[in-house]
Image (cartoon, grey):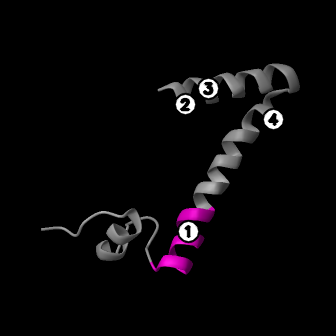
Amino acid sequence: MTKVFLVLGMVAALSARFGPAWGLFPIALMLVAFVVFHLWWLPHHYGINGLTAEPKEKYYEFRGWNRRP
């Protein structure tokens, strides 16, 4: 919950100081990072679908989890 308040405070401060476009910049930056990681990095480097986490075995290995029983 602390992260939410920190991000909201940062967005509000940027928006108040530099205008609404700069307030939206951190949100757009996080969205770009999400898209790059889930739609490019995971499939190309680990062979995992970034939206469905399939195949499950590779996803579990990536996360360091034990296989399902």
18 left or right of 40?
Answer: right
The residues tagged by marks 1 and 2 sit, at their Cα atoms, a distance apart of 24 Å
For disc 2, the neighbor class at 10 Å (few under 14, some 14 to 19, many from 20) is few
Question: For numbered disc 2, what is the local secondary structure?
Answer: helix
Vertically, is 12 above or below 48?
A: above
Query: Mark 4 — residue?
Result: 21
State the image coordinates of residue 11 (x, y, percent, origin top left).
70, 28
State the image coordinates of residue 61 (x, y, percent, origin top left).
35, 71
Amino acid on which disc 3 is placed: Leu
Query: Mark 2 — residue?
Result: 3
Whichever of callouts 4 and 2 sits on the residue coming sooner in the sequence is 2
State the image coordinates of residue 25 (x, y, percent, origin top left).
76, 40
Query: Mark 3 — residue?
Result: 6
The residues tagged by marks 3 and 2 sit, at their Cα atoms, a distance apart of 5 Å
Magenta stretch: give its range: 36-47
Q: Tell me the residue at 52%/71% (across/down).
A: 42
Looking at the image, is mark 4 or mark 2 nearer the viewer?
2
Q: Tell me the residue at 38%/63% (across/down).
A: 63
Q: CB under 8 Å between callouts 3 and 4? A: no
Amino acid on which disc 1 is placed: Leu
Question: For numbered disc 1, what is the local secondary structure?
Answer: helix
Question: For numbered disc 4, what is the local secondary structure?
Answer: helix
The residues tagged by marks 4 and 1 sit, at their Cα atoms, a distance apart of 26 Å
Query: Mark 1 — residue?
Result: 39
> Toward which corner of the image does residue 33 lie, by quadrant?
bottom right
In the image, residue 44 lies in the stretch drawn in magenta? yes
